[in-house]
Image (cartoon, rainbow, N blue to C red):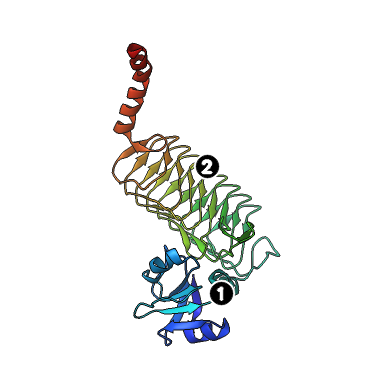
Amino acid sequence: MKFPQPIPVAELAARFNAELIGDASLQATGINEIHKVEPGDVAFSDAPKYFEKTLQSAATIILLNAPADCPPGKAILVVPEPFKVYDTLIREHRPFEPLSSPVSHRAHIHPSAILEPGVVVAANVRIGAYAYIQANTYIGEYTVIGDHVSIGPNSIIGSDAFYFKKQPDGSYQKWRSGGRVIIEDHVDIGAGCTINKGVSGDTVIGAGSKLDCQIHIGHGVVVGKNCLFAAQVGIGGKTIIEDNVVLYGQVGVVQAIRIGAGAVVLAGAGVSKSIEGGKTYFGAPADEMRTKYKELAALRMLPDMIKNKT
């Protein structure tokens, strides 16, 4: 998420009563999670074992709950509760804004786009030329929909990220979702799909990709171009799927992994780790198809092998 205007780090330090370590002349231009930070971004860590990873990321300003050595060209803000500062900044720049009408007056909809009855469009949404949004679909705040996009009925685009901060008492505090959903040109999305916006980065569906019905895309997922997903696929947050990937029906993909370009995952498979592109995968946990079929053949022989030994 980018700020409308850069914020001087010295101003942030004064506001949150933070100890400032490092370059006091820097300015924050955005805020993001560790896996998506860019130069100028604010990131945070409240666990010492992750301090170094955060400090060595692309983030320019790092919120920590203890002092640390600051790399050149960066600044550390030491505050008691980095998460609260992080969440406060997101809430300020993405304030909650309930809808008071089915289509917000602050949505930007191309005149050639078609919205069927029951479509709800939140504030700061952009819908491109010749988009076709079918009945009873919800388009959440800050969503960007490209040209020639088709979205089936009863879909939910831009719902909140499923992301919570565990508290010392065991309860969970909801993060304010400051990211967006970006659907690029010529994407087709079936009926009853759900696409979560990112926590502070973007969830992206690449140009030309096709999604069947009843698919769930988690927060911050990036789907490449010309991908094909069959019904009931579920993809965990922060996963990256490269171009031309095919996921057949009921494939489940865990969070924060990468699926290489041109990979094909057969129906019902469970992808539990990053996999290379250009290969076909099967099973749970998913493995290359030939390897998995050999394993299954060996398992079928196991009862006879045991019987012969006894």
Is residue 283 shown above or below 164?
above
Indicate the quadrant where residue 113 lies.
bottom right
**Residue at mark 1:** 80
Mark 2 or 1, nearer chain start: 1
Q: Nearer the viewer, residue 143 or 270?
A: 270
Q: Left or right? Give the position of 172 relative to 274.
A: right
- Label 2 and label 1: CA atoms lie apart by 45 Å
Q: In x, y percent, where is residue 241?
A: 39, 51
Residue drawn at the location 34% of the way across and 80% of the way down: 72
Indicate the quadrant where residue 271 lies.
top left
Q: Secondary structure at mark 1?
A: loop
Residue farthest to the front, as pictured: 310
Nearer the observer: mark 2 or 1; the answer is: 1
Q: Amino acid at mark 1?
A: Pro
Q: In x, y percent, where is residue 100?
A: 71, 65
Residue drawn at the location 41% of the way across and 55% of the way down: 206
The answer to whether the residue labelled 2 contacts the one labelled 1, judged by CB atoms less than 8 Å apart, is no
Q: Nearer the viewer, residue 247 or 20?
A: 20
Residue drawn at the location 61% of the way across and 70% of the way down: 106
Q: Amino acid at mark 2?
A: Cys
Quick check: can you spot residue 8? no
Q: Left or right? Give the position of 168 relative to 268.
A: right
Q: Nearer the viewer, residue 13 or 110?
A: 13
**Residue at mark 2:** 213
Quick check: can you spot residue 120? yes
Q: In x, y percent, where is residue 99?
A: 68, 64
